[in-house]
Image (cartoon, grey):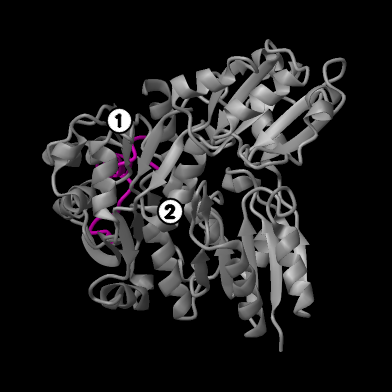
Amino acid sequence: MAGMVYLVGAGPGDYRLISLKAVDCLKVADVVVYDRLADDRILQWAPDDAEYIYVGKASSNHTMKQEDINQLLVDKAKEGKCVVRLKGGDPFVFGRGGEEGGVLQENGLPFEIVPGITSAISVPAYAGIPVTHRAVATSFAVVTGHEDPTKGKSNMRWEHLATGVDTLVFLMGVANLPHITKKLIENGRPADTPAAVIRWGTKPEQRVLMTTVGTAAEDVAKANLKPPAIFIVGDVVNLREKLQWFDEPKTHPLFGKTVLVTRARSQASKLTARLEQLGAKVIEAPAIRIEEPADHYEALDAAIAKLNDYQWLIFTSANGVDYFFARLIKTGKDARALGYAKVAAIGSATAAKLREYGIIADVVPREFRAEGVLEALKGKLPSHAKILLPRAQEAREILPAKLREQGAVVDVAPAYQTVAAEVDAESLREKLAAGEIDLVTFTSSSTVTNLVKIIGSADALKEIKTAAIGPVTAETAKGNGIEPDIVAKEYTIDGLVEAIKENI
């Protein structure tokens, strides 16, 4: 049977501007054929075992000719595959989607078009420039900037285009800017017409150059602005003064900053999302990966088998909660198995995770660390209390040690372990050395120790700001030769983000 091909618009750059239908297509893809301008994070919605084929194009540097891309889509569809052709922007706005669809139709292969948000309107919008505005512009045109100025005859009707439309948006036109501006002026567009060049629009590295038609080519050369960028011409450009929002410090105080998130990939999304909401560019390089403990849950399973013996359960992380309940459910039990045992959570995030399993913590300390738990439990433990502590395999011993000093019987049951993740160490070292990273975040002691192992030495971080989620993590950083610039007062992801916002 013939497969199915979806010609999907990936949007202008910000991966969150992709459509729900596009995500649905990616989820069922056998093959993903993707462009240079599509943010790689869009690929997270496709299956891990899908075949990924990069066919990106840069100016004068094509990974694959268009004819070969067309044939590739045909071949994969004839194999019965579900193919997603992921294209930057919209497939039909200078995306050559019409050509690809035409070839598929000629071969009797089914296809669908999934429109995307085109950079022609979204990139100006992120720069605070509307392509139309009452009393300023009632029309706009989207124009290719790729036409070869050396060819004998132009297909561009410059005499109509230059003055016949209020707003002109040239896509992929930076290399041809001298030719474009010359033609506009020759055909009646005043040289002092406001204009802007917007590079990497909708992304945290967005850069906006305000200029005029007459000075644009010179200004771009001086600023060394490179593709991908759009060129917008018209009086609407002046509205940026009032409508600037994306690169506005009050709205996005971390705009222009690049933050390295070292948290495990499975948990990085919340921190990444919060930082991106504040305008930061986030690089996820998880220093740790969470796995089952070395004893393959032997101690935890044994503890669950005698759960009725415990008077208290103490959870020191949200991970510990998840892994404990996963094993509990695997044995055919649920939260009712805790019986009359009381529960302590080291902090608000751990307490929130417990609530997801129907458990309201009896104790949550004011200070979210082991010392805080000990303080909060004073006077609450019975004599010779039996306590279960499901936690990370590698953790500080202060909590069980101090509890035992008080006469408690404490069973420490490893629920998970953190191990060094596989990271492109060379690429990460290069980014650090080049000053491409402004801040490194540490959300646990293990993220500190494993990142140092990955990059080889803490020396690579000496000129870069670092932020720790709390004093325990900060002490681990100091022990590794890193003096944190920022330490969160509240030892949570929200507390860390707030500290970064206030201090960076």
- For badge 2, the amino acid type reads Gln
Task: Identify which residue is drawn at 61% across, 39% down.
Answer: 150
Q: In this view, does 472 lie to the left or right of 237?
A: left
Mark-to-mark CA distance, 1 and 2: 20 Å
Is residue 382 a member of the stretch shown in magenta?
Answer: yes
Magenta stretch?
A: 364-387
Q: Residue 260 appears at what percent x and percent y?
A: 35, 41
Q: Do the residues labelled 1 and 2 touch (CB within 8 Å)?
A: no
- Image position of 28 with respect to 352: above or below: below
Is residue 347 visible in this depiction of the protein?
yes
Q: Residues within 10 Å of mark 2 (few under 14, many from 20)?
A: some
Residue 395 screen position, x and y as percent: 22, 54
Tally the marks. 2
Q: Position of residue 437 (x, y in %)?
A: 33, 36
The vertical placement of 119 against 195, above or below, is: below
Which residue is denoted by mark 1 in the rendering? 487
What percent of the width, then of the height, locates residue 192? Answer: 68, 10
Quadrant placement of the N terminus: bottom right
- Tag shown at residue 267: 2
Disc 2 element? helix
User: Magenta span has 128?
Assistant: no
Q: How crowded is mark 1: few (under 14 residues within 10 Å), some or many (20 or more)?
A: many
